[in-house]
Amino acid sequence: MSTTAALPKPLGLLAELTHRCPLGCPYCSNPIALDPRASELDTETWAQVFAEATALGVLQVHLSGGEPAARRDLVAITAAAHGVGLYTNLITSAVGVTAATLRRLAEAGLDHVQISIQDSERAAADHIAGYEGAFARKRALAAEVVGLKIPLTVNAVMHRANIDRIEEMVALALALGASRVEIAHVQYYGWAVKNRAALMPSAAQVARAAALVEELRARHHGRIVIDAVVPDYYARLPKPCVGGWGRRSLNVTPAGKVLPCHAAESIPGLEFWSVREHSLADIWTNSPAFNAFRGTAWMQEPCRTCPRREIDFGGCRCQAFALTGDARATDPVCHLSPRHEDVAALAAVQEDAPYVYRRL
Ligand code: SF4
Ligand code: FES
């Protein structure tokens, strides 16, 4: 694939404004090697990226991090995205976003806020975040968001220590005034691999959680949308990660590298291009990393001849690499993968070891 005409249009842009973050979550999805502050793109370059994204067909931008509020120019960045017509979603830990900043963000055109919540109980939430007082700040910011009538999504990250409190997490999201709650199970790439045994839920917990989510969806129908999927290590079929490599979205790192997914740097040997040297359209169409796993020609068996190959695209490339050492392999989450039993064996390793926190 080499022409824009032959390619699908990206719909979403994940703008990782910074890797700086006050929290220390043991399941951090940022890469092992973080971009230092000095390498971060400036306001004008982000504005140029947003303009190029709009021209490429992108409809929404997720302003993320790290903690995006660590950027002093977050309001100007938001205004730039809004100014070119992008739907703007702020993905925040809530730590560092004051009520005054939120009001200025709303005036700049912020359309949506997503707050991550670590648990329904203060002590447990602050423990996993590695930040005393984080839970109270999240509650306070959620109230400000709802007060400004900005739609709110709660992102509830689930693991062994809190998966038995899904009902309480959904109740908390309702009490906070969220219109949507994502039951997001920890994904084990990058930093989270270090804490896999400490975070992995049991099969019995996952089964109970799946049944409870169905019940909660019925109970709260029309009041809140509950998004949830079976966690990877307990699934029989993989997720179509990022909607298929290079098909739906792009991800710009704090320093300006453009990735097909947030964890793509965990795959060695891929060549990423930067917005400092190339236009977003050029990167989307021609960069080696985006073309590495586009389409189906790169696939091995059993994906190559599988009827689902254009439904799930062989699963997640980062997970395939993390679990097999081969990014072209079938994601071992798939029951048709010859390595599927390895996933079950890893899921069975559960140890109550202390968390290895993510610190800058
Ligand atoms: Fe998906 Fe490949 Fe499994 Fe088929 S074999 S279901 S394409 S991961
Ligand atoms: Fe990279 Fe799934 S996280 S392809």
Image (spheres, rainbow, N blue to C red):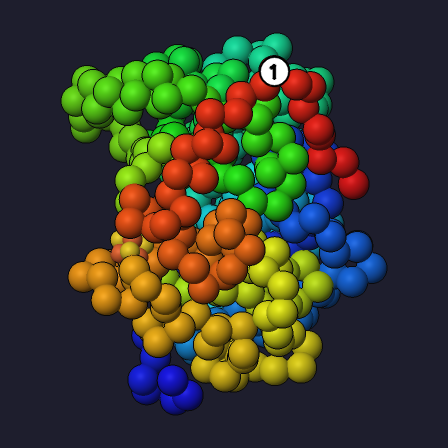
For residue 7, what is the image quadrant? bottom left
Residue tagged 1: 352
Compare residues 191 and 298 and report the one nearer the observer: 298
Compare residues 225 and 201 and report the one nearer the observer: 201
> Viewed as shown, does residue 271 lie left or right of 206?
right
The residue that appears at 66% across and 18% down in the rendered structure is 353
Quarter of the render that holds ligand 1: bottom left
Residue 6: % across, % down: 31, 84
Q: Quadrant of the N terminus?
A: bottom left
Residue 35: % across, % down: 74, 56
As drawn, 225 above or below 29? above
Residue 143: % across, % down: 49, 24
As drawn, 37 above or below 182? below
Tell me the kind of residue under disc 1.
Asp
Compare residues 27 and 149 and report the one nearer the observer: 27
The residue that appears at 24% across and 20% down in the rendered structure is 211
For residue 219, what is the image quadrant? top left
The residue that appears at 66% across and 71% down in the rendered structure is 45
